[in-house]
Structures are given as C-alpha cells and as structure tokens.
Amino acid sequence: DGGITQSPKYLFRKEGQNVTLSCEQNLNHDAMYWYRQDPGQGLRLIYYSQIVNDFQKGDIAEGYSVSREKKESFPLTVTSAQKNPTAFYLCASSFSGSPYEQYFGPGTRLTVT
Amino acid sequence: GEDVEQSLFLSVREGDSSVINCTYTDSSSTYLYWYKQEPGAGLQLLTYIFSNMDMKQDQRLTVLLNKKDKHLSLRIADTQTGDSAIYFCARGGDSGAGSYQLTFGKGTKLSVIP
C-alpha cells in the first residue's frame, strides 16, 4: 500500500535533548513538508523540500533542522534551541505539479518535559 | 486578520446538512482544499476546487466557491456521527515560488448529535 509513515506515534524527551522524527513516503512524491499543530492554532509550516538535497524554511523554522538525502525520506530534528517543542508534528508529501494535493502521515506527538 | 479564517465550532443533528464556511484574503490562490482530521490522526484530503470553478460535488460533499467574496464552503449532506471531526480549509497553488505551500485555517470542529 502506498502512503506516508511517521514514527514513532508518541515520543517523550527530556528538555535539552535533540530528537529526530521520521517521515517516509512511497508515493513517489517529489515534495515533502513538515507541519506543527498546536491546539487552536491550525497547522504551521516548519520546513519543506521540493527536491532531494534541497529544502526551504517555512514560517516557524527556528529550532528545527531537516535533511533530504533520499526522495522517500524527510527527517525532522527538533533541537534544544526550540523553546516550546511539545506539539503534534505532521509530515506531508505531494507531486511537484498542480493541483499540489498534499497527503499527510498519521503524525507524531512529541512531549518534552 | 488571518489569511484563512473559519469558525471554530459547528454542531448539527444526525441526518441534517452541515455547512462549514471559510474566507480567505489572498486571491492569487489557484486551488482551495478541504481536509478532515479525526482525533489523534493526520489530515485526510476530502476534496479541492480550482479557482475558476463555482461548484464541485462529490457524493455527499458539495464545495461552493464565491471568488468575488473570497468565500468557500463545504456542505455535507445527511451528516453522520462518523463525520464528527475537525475540518480544515486551505489555499494554495499560488503562482511563483510559493506554489507548493498551503496556508491552512485553524479548523472547524464539527460535532454531530445522534
């Protein structure tokens, strides 16, 4: 089955530690995205990548880093510089042409204490 | 104001129609989308409409677009308890470098009363 997988579903970390969230897709999509979702805030774009070895900052990139070494994979690292990292993180992917439909993974809930 | 605005809550009785409304400010968007999110899950694309269309129907879902007023609506006919979820409006497909990016509203929580 084609789709987007994110692991793990729940992640717990101590403050001051970096943590990497996994996102893999087998849809042959060119573009991949990371969003953060907080209650009542909707989705906010962290980073996106249109092609392998290239990525751009979204609206809230501070304290996060990404890599895109393979077309299928777009891991997100939440660094200790992120002031409020506890949130629900969603990965998405799309083809590079219109209508730019984005398909989402099931999400990872990160709790930092 | 926000780029994409939605009312936060909507409550309907099972079997009635639900209408979820969305307004946006940027008229350069080529596509407008509706997504559904069930508790603790990712977003599921329900439908999208191209900006030169007025209406799109897909089974129980009807999307209406008033481009002049920058108003988008999603009508769910014969609403069922399984339709209870948060519904997000999004715009995207803008020309130029921003074409990949979607801008989301904050979501409308639909509660269906049995």
Image (cartoon, coloured by chain):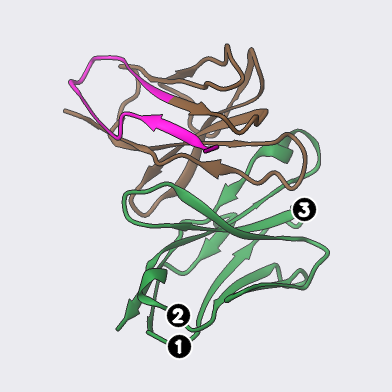
Chain colours: A brown, B green
Disc number placed over residue B79 in the picture, else none: 2
Callout 2: residue from which chain? B
Q: Residues within 10 Å of mark 2 (few under 14, many from 20)?
A: many
Q: Magenta includes A6?
A: yes
- Please name the residue that numbered disc 1 is placed on: B16
In which quadrant is the N terminus of chain B drawn? Answer: bottom right
- Please name the residue that numbered disc 3 is placed on: B30
Left/right of residue A17 with respect to residue A68 in the rendered view: left
In which quadrant is the C terminus of chain B drawn? Answer: bottom left
Quadrant in which residue B113 is drawn: bottom left
Residues drawn in magenta: A1-22
Badge 3 amino acid:
Thr
Q: Secondary structure at mark 3?
A: loop
Give percent across and percent down for residue B91. 65, 53
Could you say which is closer to the camera, residue A23 or residue B28? A23
The CA span between labels 2 and 3 is: 29 Å
